[in-house]
Image: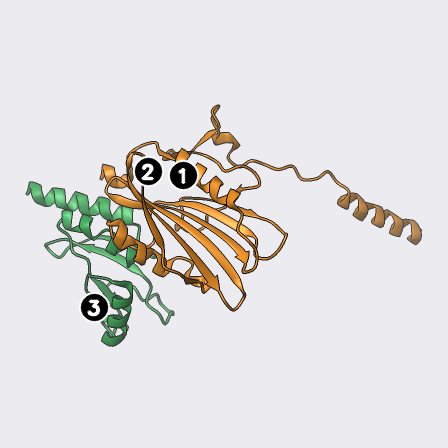
């Protein structure tokens, strides 16, 4: 999350917004977000359907795994990656999507 | 027969102990140029700190390059220096980055830091900020002297870290800090960063 916070100015530059999703409750996330001084929204999804939609619940495993998803303006998933975010990859993708959007 | 077999085994074991002493391998030898500088990952150029400082193998992405030095006179007796492309925290303003950084720095060491002493500086011809601070680990009666140079690469903040751990009653070794200062003074960026080329 700190990496995303560090890159917020670049996300802005590429006309992108970042949102975190967690199964923790609102109070826990608020405390955590304040502690890390995050300025982007973290969504609380205790039921976990968002994680299920994006395939973050491996079969037979009780916990959601980390995943980065980039969705374009039309709602199309353009990028997905499991595990630790690859910020270079994310930024390259956002730059490309922004260029596509500017062109169209 | 059994006796000679036992004797043979003992000789083999002793032979294994008495082998040639392991030679010290310089892991950066292949990267070292005629003037003694090293080009690391085709990104950074620097003079490595002198022996017994040694390269630290990096398994996490907290540091881009790191060196450490240990001694056995007392415990703890170790120093470390590193360059980090992404130092803790996220603000691009040096003065805002300092508290963000020290909130996370050596967190697992349970160190209680004093107030960092800040001193404006320059790095690579651009403004930088040096933060010096001492931390105490009261339970183990250890102390750590830390110096962090916040510098700029493009529009982002990069950092050079230095720490020296000692028992609370033992004085710090100023030579280690000098080695760190020399490392920072020699450090150059070979090419624009990923973010500058983005």
Label 2 chain ID? B
| Quadrant where the C terminus of chain B is found in the figure | top left
Chain A shown in which color? green
Q: Residues within 10 Å of mark 1 (few under 14, many from 20)?
A: many
Furthest-left residue in this view: A104
Q: Which residue is mark 3?
A: A43
Q: Which residue is mark 2?
A: B123
Q: Position of residue A93 (x, y in %)?
A: 21, 46
Residue at 54 percent across and 56 percent down: it is: B166
Residue at 73 percent across and 38 percent down: it is: B20
Chain B shown in which color? orange
Q: Residues within 10 Å of mark 3 (few under 14, many from 20)?
A: some
Are dots 3 and 1 on a single chain? no
Foreground residue, B95 or B80?
B95
Foreground residue, A45 or B73?
B73
Compared with B30, B66 (above or below) is below
């Amino acid at each position: 999350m700190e990496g995303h916070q560090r890159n917020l100015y670049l996300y802005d530059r590429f006309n992108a917004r970042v949102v975190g999703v967690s199964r923790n409750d609102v109070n826990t996330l608020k405390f955590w977000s304040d502690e890390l001084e995050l300025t982007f929204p973290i969504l609380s999804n205790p039921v976990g359907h968002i994680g299920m939609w994006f395939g973050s619940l491996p079969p037979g495993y009780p916990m959601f795994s980390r995943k980065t998803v980039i969705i374009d303006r039309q709602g199309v998933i353009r990028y997905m990656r499991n595990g630790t975010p690859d910020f270079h990859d994310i930024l390259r993708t956002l730059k490309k999507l922004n260029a596509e959007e500017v062109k169209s | 027969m059994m006796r000679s077999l036992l004797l043979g085994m003992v000789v083999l074991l002793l032979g294994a102990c008495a082998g040639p002493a392991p030679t010290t391998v310089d892991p950066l030898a292949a990267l070292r140029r005629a003037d003694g500088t090293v080009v690391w990952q085709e990104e950074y150029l620097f003079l490595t700190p002198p022996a017994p400082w040694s390269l630290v193998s990096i398994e996490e992405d907290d540091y881009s390059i790191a060196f450490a030095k240990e001694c056995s006179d007392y415990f703890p007796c170790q120093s470390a220096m590193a360059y980090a492309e992404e130092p803790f925290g996220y603000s691009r303003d040096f003065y805002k980055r300092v508290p963000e950084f020290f909130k996370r720095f050596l967190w697992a060491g349970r160190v209680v830091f004093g107030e960092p002493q800040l001193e404006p500086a320059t790095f690579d011809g651009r403004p930088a900020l040096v933060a010096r601070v001492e931390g105490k680990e009261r339970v183990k009666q250890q102390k750590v002297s830390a110096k962090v140079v916040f510098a700029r690469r493009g529009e982002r903040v990069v950092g050079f870290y230095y720490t020296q751990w000692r028992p609370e009653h033992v004085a710090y070794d100023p030579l280690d800090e000098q080695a760190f200062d020399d490392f920072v003074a020699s450090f150059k960026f070979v090419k624009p960063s990923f973010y500058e080329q983005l």
